[in-house]
Image: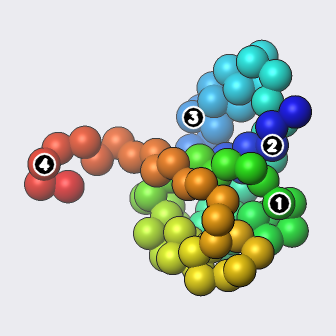
Amino acid sequence: MTKILLVEDTEDIRDLLTSRLRRRGFEVELAQDGEAGVKAARSGRPELVLLDMSMPMKDGWTAAREMRANPATASVPIIALTAHALAGD
């Protein structure tokens, strides 16, 4: 079973994505902010990270840089999640 780390601070989005992913057979680990996400990526060894880019404490950009800088998480694919979809964002 593929293990996905979902790093998302909005409860409704977390619940929706977790439910959909689990129904499709994925194992989902959750983190509610960037700091917790970096720690979970190091300890949980996910095969994929879904990372919200706008979060409190540590944003997704910073969390992604830290994951890339650590040999234990450098090769884990990261998919950015964001509501900022306009060209100016």
Name the residue type under label 2: Lys
Q: Residues within 10 Å of mark 1 (few under 14, many from 20)?
A: some
Q: Earlier in the sequence, mark 1 or mark 2?
A: 2
Q: Give yes or no for contact between labels 1 and 2 (Cβ–Cβ under 8 Å).
A: yes
Helix, strand or loop status at disc 2: strand
From the image, tell me which residue sits under label 3. 13
From the image, tell me which residue sits under label 2. 3
Instruction: Report the residue at 35% width, 42% height from top.
Output: 83
Q: Residues within 10 Å of mark 4 (few under 14, many from 20)?
A: few
Q: Which mark is residue 45?
A: 1
Viewer can see residue 39: no
Q: Earlier in the sequence, mark 4 or mark 2?
A: 2
Q: Give yes or no for contact between labels 4 and 2 (Cβ–Cβ under 8 Å).
A: no
Mark 4 or mark 3: which is in front?
4
Instruction: Report the residue at 81% width, 43% height from top.
Output: 3
Mark 1 → mark 2, Cα distance in angstroms = 8 Å
Helix, strand or loop status at disc 1: loop
Residue 20 position (above or below residue 53): above
Name the residue type under label 1: Arg
Viewer can see residue 75: yes
Name the residue type under label 3: Ile
> In the displayed structure, does residue 6 sit left or right of residue 72?
left
> In the displayed structure, does residue 26 sit left or right of residue 70?
right
Q: Which quadrant is the C terminus positioned in?
A: bottom left
> Residue 26's image quarter?
top right
Instruction: Report the residue at 64% width, 52% height from top.
Output: 49
Mark 4 → mark 3, Cα distance in angstroms = 23 Å
Mark 3 → mark 2, Cα distance in angstroms = 18 Å
Mark 4 → mark 1, Cα distance in angstroms = 33 Å
Residue 83 position (above or below residue 7): above
Q: Earlier in the sequence, mark 3 or mark 1?
A: 3
